[in-house]
Image (cartoon, grey):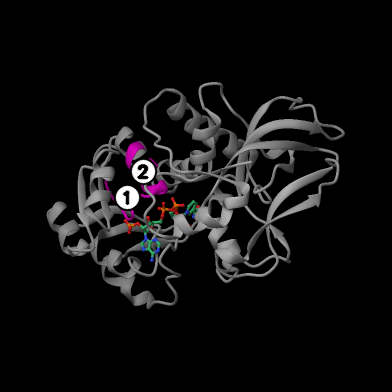
Amino acid sequence: MKTQAVRIHRHGGPEVIQLDEIDLPEPAAGHVRIRNTCIGVNYADIYEREGDHGGPHSAKDLPITMGHMAVGVVDAVGKDVTSHTIGARVGYIGPNSYATLTNMPAARLFSLPDAVTDDVAGGYLLRGLTAEYLLRRLYRVGPGTTALVHAAAGGMGLILGEWGRLLGARMIGTVSSEAKAEVARAHGYDAIINYSSEDFVARTLQETDGKGADVIYDGVGKMAFLKSLDCVRPRGLVVSYGTASGNVGEFDLQRLHSKSIIVTRPTLRSWIAEPDEAAAASKALFDVLSGGQIQTPLGARFPLAKAAEAHRQLESRSVTAPIVLIP
Ligand SMILES: NC(=O)c1ccc[n+]([C@@H]2O[C@H](COP(=O)([O-])OP(=O)(O)OC[C@H]3O[C@@H](n4cnc5c(N)ncnc54)[C@H](OP(=O)(O)O)[C@@H]3O)[C@@H](O)[C@H]2O)c1
């Protein structure tokens, strides 16, 4: 069967992205074919396009059908699939999602509750599962926790703010502009630091009576990581979960010594690797999304042919809600 697929034939900027028509094999045993209805655009896609990030985003063989997640409808089932039937609404975290049709192992699908729309799941499935492990398992935030989140008005920042507040934590966010400060204030943050005009280290210490934040969620990387070590509390945790401003690179381990700081560099895929973990994580996410307990603002929608434009927008630092592709 033919599918439209957004592919790269070489690594580089958004200009290397193109729309191709390719053959998709019938789903193998244990797999299903999904007709994608809403495809999330995430920083992982930018790392995939650039090809030089290493770790879980190490370069794969070219050409690559891009993408890391989508939601859609089961369109065909391979042999031995009993868990899903044609027409079921599903979401997935997996490769080759920038396409009209994608084959995925049935065991890796999340069944979408009726109360979670395709648009919300498209924007928040990957980010929401990430927020779930960051806030509930890697560190358990709750009443008494002060968390600092960098890029608080970005896609990840919004759901971390909303869910962190729901869990009872005190949320402090950094942003690069006053307009973004307004957005973050409306999404769970008790205090906002504009790090373009203010020193976020001094202000975080001031907000925490000189102690420092219990946990710092850093999706910015190069620009924010080392300074974060200066405003985490003794024995606190700095989570380097993303690198929107560039990789952190090497740093001196001695920087952690005087405060016994804990640092981690996690990836979602390790935190939903086991089927029971993935099921529990998605249940927790769908519960908060379905119950209307958190707000989930939606950003721009682009057709597959405009995927390069979607990347430009995400990289432009102007985005304050998740961007999606609609095949
Ligand atoms: N490890 C995981 O499991 C995992 C899973 C999902 C996402 N992530 C990470 O989460 C982070 C956020 O992802 P997102 O898709 O929701 O993006 P986003 O937060 O909407 O966009 C990135 C934000 O980073 C800030 N930033 C600072 N310096 C920047 C620079 N030089 N260029 C671009 N942005 C810069 C900007 O906010 P300000 O202008 O306010 O600074 C920008 O809005 C990414 O780093 C991504 O890799 C990690």
Q: Amino acid at mark 2?
A: Leu
**Any part of residue 106 in sight:** no
- From what the image shows, is residue 48 above or below residue 25? below
Residue at mark 1: C-beta within 8 A of ligand 1: yes
- The residue to which callout 2 is attached is 158
Q: Earlier in the sequence, mark 2 or mark 1?
A: 1
Which disc, if any, is residue 198? none
Secondary structure found at label 2:
helix
**Residue at the image position 34 percent from the left and 42 percent from the top:** 141
Residues at discs 2 and 1 in contact (Cβ within 8 Å): yes
For the point 38% across and 75% down, the residue is 253
Name the spot of residue 324 as percent of width and height, x first: 53, 44
Image: magenta residue range: 146-162
Helix, strand or loop status at disc 1: loop
**Which residue position holds label 1?**
152
The spot of residue 303 in percent (x, y) is: 59, 45
Ligand 1 lies in quarter: bottom left
| Magenta stretch: includes residue 157 | yes
For residue 294, above or below residue 135: above
